[in-house]
Image (tube, rainbow, N blue to C red):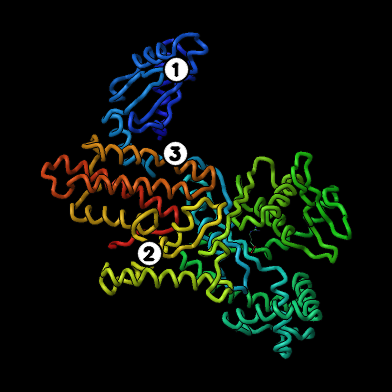
């Protein structure tokens, strides 16, 4: 469906042409004086310069040519503005078209295209901490937005499963249990199916090993060797690696599930490993990789750089692959498997330089063709009330599970105190509200900015919060349930000014979703639904809906709030949460 502004602009352009002026002057914008009109066109002012006459003369002539059935107000005002209000019938027809079209008539901009969204990015064997929250929440939302716009979308978790942390665990395990068959180089039998550790043991082993590495040089050396041997295929180490993966991945799945975050692809750095040798050989052959201090690097600096961009390191002097190597090899793999039109990476913004280097290397070498878009969305930090990165009370790194359970406990108290639902529904309702509080609290900020985690504010039922949006949806649901069957009711002309404001807000769905997509900004969706929810609540307070005696009028009210509810529910689904039945 055409966006409403484009439709009005087209009508305006026709009117300019019909009055004898260039159609390109007929661009309409949303009014910056909503007290005067809904839309405006300033084209006559620009046209006046070209046609050397008074702007008001042009505005008047154009106003004459506009179709009065489309507008309830067409006003040419000094010095030459055109002020417009849509007619009730125009607005009604537009909303009815939205109501009956699939996905409210939002154009499928991504049809036929493939997008890979690389987010989450946890490192196996390390517990998820709050640093992983933003990538998961923002990535999930953007992935859903890509899907909504019709892209063939693949969310890839890109596990950190190939680095030193694996060698550290192996080395630590060897010190603790040297008798295990995995460490016996002469062992040729099958390795046990049962892992030699549980997830909680694993979560203890890793930090212990990481701490030891700092103090004990010999141990650090062992861990490096173990990493190297693992990557080069030592059987026993591969078997331990597989155990670490199995134990860790099922735990990760559980945690992401709790967050309502899901991935289509569970590949990791290790899956890119087989692509490395050929890729490196090719880059060397073509002279794109050069030697520098024993390492192989791809120079990526460009003349126009304002700051120095160091070369992208491909192979370290000890022959090992690093983060950039696996990222490039992953691109080789993704081009082979999917030939995506777009790859979007969501990480902390401190990784900006890494992605700048990798993207340049990928384009320069042709690993990624010119027509494929590469984008890194670097997000800011989640801070505590003191403005510093969020910590536990004793100053430690907070685990993601802990943060979620703190928020859940906080919300549960409210749900119980306010007797919102029956005892057996408390958990389900609490979970939904807590998820909305957490996700909306994060997503309503521009991703690149830091924000302060404020449980009280995020979980409030009033104000610009997730629970407020849920509350609005629940309110409409309860009216609809009391009313009865509503699904077939058509949109009617606005019955009062609050209905009109709500209708106008509804028409802004498509442009807002497009902006959110184009600028990777879920916060645009949040701002939109906050405005929409405000219009719904205003309308609800000023209009007797269920007690309206005129059945036809009432049907119009119901159809309108039902459409608003469906839009709100679609939008919160794009943000990654959903509304409970009662609140
Ligand atoms: N595992 C990485 C980290 O913890 C994030 C991975 C992001 N994705 C990527 N393709 N590099 O920092």
Q: Secondary structure at mark 3?
A: helix
State whether residue 421 appears in this view: no
Among the two numbered marks 1 and 2 on one chain, the one whose residue lies closer to the N terminus: 1
Report x, y in % for residue 516: 49, 45
Residue assigned mark 2: 432
Q: Is residue 254 left or right of residue 105?
A: right
The quadrant of the image that shows the C terminus is bottom left
**Disc 3: CA contacts within 10 A as few (<14), some (14-19) or many (>=20):** some
Q: Looking at the picture, does residue 55 appear above or below residue 268?
A: above
Q: Looking at the picture, does residue 440 appear above or below residue 429?
A: above
Residue 44: which disc? 1
CA gap between label 2 and label 3 equals 28 Å
Q: Quadrant of ligand 1?
A: bottom right
Q: Is residue 531 left or right of residue 180?
A: left
Q: Looking at the picture, does residue 457 appear above or below residue 66?
A: below
Among the two numbered marks 3 and 1 on one chain, the one whose residue lies closer to the N terminus: 1
Among the two numbered marks 2 and 3 on one chain, the one whose residue lies closer to the N terminus: 2
Of all residues, the one furthest to the left in this rendering is 549
Q: Nearer the viewer, residue 299 or 536?
A: 536
Q: Which residue is at 44% across, 52% downward? A: 574
Report x, y in % for residue 188: 75, 83
Report x, y in % for residue 200: 57, 81
State whether residue 499 appears in this view: yes
Q: Nearer the viewer, residue 430 or 1?
A: 430
Residue assigned mark 3: 511
Residue 268: which disc? none
The quadrant of the image that shows the N terminus is top left
CA gap between label 1 and label 2 equals 51 Å
């Amino acid at each position: 469906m055409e966006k409403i502004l484009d439709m009005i602009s087209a009508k305006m352009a026709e009117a300019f042409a019909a009055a004898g002026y260039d159609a390109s002057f007929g661009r309409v914008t949303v009014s910056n004086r909503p007290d005067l009109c809904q839309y405006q066109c300033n084209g006559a002012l620009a046209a006046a310069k070209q046609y050397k006459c008074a702007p008001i003369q042009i505005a008047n002539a154009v106003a004459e040519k506009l179709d009065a059935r489309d507008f309830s107000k067409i006003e040419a005002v000094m010095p030459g503005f055109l002020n417009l209000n849509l007619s009730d019938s125009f607005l009604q027809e537009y909303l009815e078209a939205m109501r009956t079209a699939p996905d409210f008539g939002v154009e499928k901009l991504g049809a036929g295209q493939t997008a890979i969204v690389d987010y989450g990015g946890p490192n196996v064997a390390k517990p998820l901490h709050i640093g992983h929250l933003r990538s998961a929440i923002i990535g999930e939302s953007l992935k859903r937005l890509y899907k909504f716009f019709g892209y063939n979308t693949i969310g890839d978790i890109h596990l950190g499963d190939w680095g030193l942390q694996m060698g550290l665990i192996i080395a630590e395990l060897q010190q603790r249990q040297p008798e295990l068959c995995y460490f016996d180089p002469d062992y040729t039998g099958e390795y046990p199916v049962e892992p030699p550790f549980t997830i909680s043991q694993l979560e203890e082993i890793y930090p212990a090993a990481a701490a030891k590495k700092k103090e004990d040089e010999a141990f650090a050396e062992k861990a490096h060797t173990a990493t190297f041997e693992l990557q080069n295929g030592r059987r026993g180490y591969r078997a331990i690696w597989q155990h670490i993966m199995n134990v860790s991945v099922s735990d990760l799945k559980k945690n992401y599930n709790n967050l309502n975050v899901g991935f289509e692809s569970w590949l990791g750095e290790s899956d890119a490993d087989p692509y490395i040798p050929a890729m490196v050989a090719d880059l060397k052959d073509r002279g794109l990789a050069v030697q520098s201090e024993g390492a192989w690097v791809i120079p990526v600096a460009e003349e126009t750089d304002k700051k120095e961009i160091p070369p992208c390191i491909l192979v370290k002097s000890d022959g090992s692959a690093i983060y950039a190597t696996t990222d490039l090899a992953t691109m080789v793999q993704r081009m082979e498997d999917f030939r995506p039109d777009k790859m979007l990476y969501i990480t902390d913004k401190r990784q900006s330089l890494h992605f700048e280097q990798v993207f340049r290397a990928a384009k320069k070498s042709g690993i990624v063709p010119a027509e494929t878009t590469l984008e890194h969305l670097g997000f800011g930090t989640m801070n505590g009330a003191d403005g510093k990165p969020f910590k536990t009370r004793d100053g430690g790194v907070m685990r993601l599970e802990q943060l979620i359970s703190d928020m859940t406990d906080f919300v549960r108290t409210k749900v119980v105190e306010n007797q919102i639902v029956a005892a057996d529904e408390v958990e389900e309702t609490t979970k939904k509200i807590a998820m909305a509080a957490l996700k909306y609290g994060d997503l309503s900020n521009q991703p690149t900015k830091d924000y302060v985690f404020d449980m009280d504010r995020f979980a409030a039922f009033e104000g610009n919060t997730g629970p407020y949006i849920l509350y609005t949806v629940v309110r409409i649901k309860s009216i609809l349930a009391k009313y009865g069957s509503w699904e077939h009711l058509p949109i009617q002309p606005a019955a009062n000014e609050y209905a009109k404001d709500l209708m106008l807000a509804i028409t802004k769905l498509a442009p807002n979703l497009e902006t959110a997509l184009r600028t990777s900004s879920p916060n645009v969706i949040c701002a939109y639904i906050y405005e929409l929810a405000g219009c719904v609540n205003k309308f609800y307070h000023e209009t007797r809906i269920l007690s309206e005696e005129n059945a036809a009028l009432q049907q119009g009210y119901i159809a309108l709030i039902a459409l608003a509810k469906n839009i709100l529910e679609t939008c919160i689904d794009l943000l990654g949460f959903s509304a409970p039945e009662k609140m």
